[in-house]
Amino acid sequence: MISIALVGDRSPTVRAHGRIPMIVDALRESEGLDLDVYWVPTPAAEDPEALRGFSGIWLVPGSPYRSEAGAVGAVRIARTEGIPFLGTCGGFQHAMLDFARDVCGFTGARHAENGPAGEDDLIVELSCSLAGHEAAVDLVPGSLVERLLGATRTVERYHCSYGLSPAYLELLQAHGMRFTGHDRSGEVRVAELPGHPFFLASLFQPELSGEGAHPLIRGFARAAGATSRPVLSGPAGPNA
């Protein structure tokens, strides 16, 4: 059994949430994966014990989350305990917050969506909103995302208005974060953490791509399968 925590505040208004059950079914059918998937609301994720024992943690879109602390905490558990992690859209943004605060020492790193703009905003409003847009992403050869997609360029769908501030790219890179996907203007769209079993975050939403499971999601599910473990605590929400 491959137990995956979907960390996010499930809502019928978030299109990606509605597609996830279909994606899980596609993975079960096409990959033969025995997936056991549970939704964990972000307030519940504030307790690390709610996530220990899962084979994979997927921080799904839907920012602003009900609990920023829970979203960041989910990333931290996955990162520090070697649990395969996928962060999409808001998941990307909060993965960068965790890394900046806990690894880079930038403890005041903020998300501009959660308060007035300030000089410590790591996640800032994009000059051009990507909500509802489709755009090309150039991928670094040899990166995890390039291997999963089998190409150095992809066209992906977005539904977000916030991204990583260029002012802090060097700080995150200096501490080990690798930026492996960029749009045509050079803005970061994918990040990964070398040395981790699977740690991948994308500002685009692979949940919205075509039929079946996107290669990033397939790769995440396979990685979770390779490190499958029993769930030590009961599920915090209904399964998908």
Image: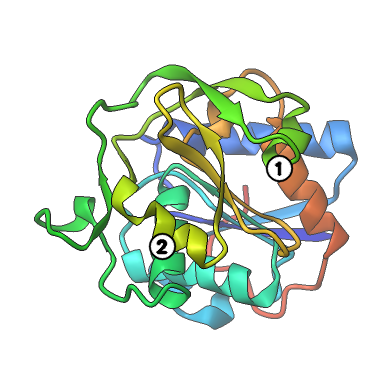
Q: Which color scheme does this rendered protein use?
A: rainbow
Q: Marks 1 and 2: CB-CB under 8 Å? A: no
Query: Residue 152's spot in the image, x, y percent?
Result: 68, 25
Depth check, front residue: 139 or 201 = 139
Quick one: label 1 or label 2, which is nearer the N terminus? 1
Whether residue 31 sits left or right of residue 143 in the image: it is right
Image height of 191 relative to 20, above or below: below
Image height of 38 relative to 140, above or below: below
The residue located at (40%, 67%) in the rendering is 100
Say few, some or many: other residues with alpha carbon within 10 Å of mark 1 (under 14 / 14 to 19 / 20 or more): some
Whether residue 224 sits left or right of residue 100 in the image: it is right
Image height of 218 relative to 72, above or below: above
Depth check, front residue: 1 or 191 = 191
Q: Amino acid at mark 2?
A: Leu
Q: Amino acid at mark 1?
A: Ser
The residue located at (75%, 40%) in the rendering is 142
Query: Residue 39's spot in the image, x, y percent?
Result: 55, 56
Query: Residue 149's spot in the image, x, y percent?
Result: 73, 29
Disc ID at residue 56? none
Quarter of the figure with residue 198:
bottom right
Say few, some or many: other residues with alpha carbon within 10 Å of mark 2 (under 14 / 14 to 19 / 20 or more): some
Depth check, front residue: 129 or 224 = 129
Residue linked to disc 2 = 171
Whether residue 186 can be seen here: yes
Indicate the secondary structure of the residue bearing disc 1: loop
Residue linked to disc 1 = 143
Report, in whole angstroms, how far the alpha carbon at label 1 lies from the one at label 2. 20 Å
